[in-house]
Image (spheres, rainbow, N blue to C red):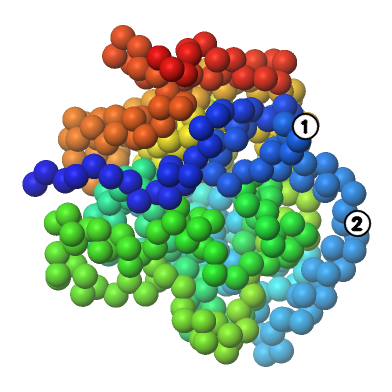
Amino acid sequence: MSIKKETLDYELHKKRKEVKFCKKCVISNQRPRIEFDENGVCSACNYTERKKKIDWSKREKELKDLCDKFRSKDNNYDVIVPGSGGKDSAYVAHILKTEYNMKPLCVTWAPHKYSSIGRENFFDFVDSGFDNLTCFQDGKIHRKLSLLGFKFIGDNFLPFVLGQKAYAFNLSVKLKIPLMFYGECGPVEYGGDTKNKIDQPKESFENWDKDYHKGTNIKKILQKGYDVGILDKKDLKKSFEFYQHPKKNEIDKIGCEMHWMSYYRQWFPQENYYYAVENTNFKPRVGRSESTYTRFASLDDDTDGVHWLLGYIKFGLGRASSDAAHEIREGHFTREEGIKLVKKFDHEFPEKDIKNFLEYVEISRDEFDDVIEFYYKQSQNIWKKIDGKWKLRHTLTNDGCDDNPYPKNK
């Protein structure tokens, strides 16, 4: 059937028309909810400077006190750590166990389509000394939700993002383990809405739809799926409990608290990688990941590259931009070096992951390209079509300003 093209991603409807790049890193103001100061510096770079003034010894004491507060009195689990066994979740789980004498229950919302290295790292993590509960979703329904996310949100990872946040809260309630530990607070570390997040150790679920789900939730995407005929009445009878947070009264009754490790300890993704290699036998990909220069981040899913590609098309910021931005902030290389990496890799189409995604959701390349074309057209403040190919209107330059090779009015 023919489906009307539209997007439910509210970020696209409120996107800034003028494109500006941060004077310190390679991120632009097109990143959803990011804030720029009067000097043209993004909120993530400003937070990096702010971290230099934090009393980390005081934060360390706060973490010890928190662990003492929630430590089990009867040798049961005393903290839930969501994660895939990747570098960041491995780091969090391992330090809680070895440095703070906690008993973590690790929980995993399984990827859409496990990569071989992702599966290997997951089992190596478990074998290094951790209990784990993994949720493998109804594959037929999850594929349909991924297709709906791709078409109407511009993110094939929508069902993964929904469950990644909600699964831990549901287990916290069901197993009566109130403390949960995630890795970093993305909005402050990488750029986003920092309201009620700067210098805050934890978050609740109230702003999930706005901050993480692109203005939607499982109920909205189910309704859209039914309206367009991708889901039927039988599909809707499935339980979608783990795709949404528990009821507020259930959360309050248990006293659930979801904390960020990045509040208590300085957060360096590359250092987390070295830590995980040493302590949980984490392995990087052989060769770099498509669309970027790194080989140790975001490895779990064979459709992962499509998620990054869609972000690049909607906001002009690809996988290399994301990797380079935080490595510039961490001092691993200069902005000039980061610009070169962005220009070399950001535009690369992840052909292997595209092929995996087409097989996963069972659509043709023509149908895929049709959706991609639609999202290009939603972002014509970023893109201009020249000789049948979409070209960036704005590119990074070394002087901290953006280059504008194509006039806005043409």
At label 2, counting other C-alpha atoms closer than 10 Å, the crowd grade (few under 14, some 14-19, many 20 or more) is: few
The residue under the point 90% across, 49% down is 53
Along the line of sight, the residue nearer the viewer: 167 or 387: 387
User: In the figure, 299 relative to 54: above or below?
Assistant: above
Quickly name the residue at label 1.
39
Is residue 252 left or right of 171 when viewed as pictured? right
Dividing the picture into quadrants, the one containing residue 357 is top left
Q: Is residue 238 visible?
A: yes
Q: Are marks 1 and 2 in contact (CB under 8 Å)?
A: no
Residue 85 drawn at (x, y percent): 54, 55
Name the amino acid, label 1: Asn
User: In the figure, 170 relative to 384: above or below?
Assistant: below
User: In the figure, 358 relative to 260: above or below?
Assistant: above
Quadrant for the C terminus in the image = top left
| Element type at mark 1 | loop
Residue 55 got which mark? 2
Residue 2 drawn at (x, y percent): 11, 44
Is residue 331 left or right of 366 when viewed as pictured? right
Q: Is residue 285 visible?
A: no
| Element type at mark 2 | loop
- Going by the picture, which residue comes out furthest to the left? 1
Residue 189 drawn at (x, y percent): 68, 47
The residue under the point 62% across, 61% down is 182
The residue under the point 27% across, 49% down is 147
Is residue 187 left or right of 83 when viewed as pictured? right
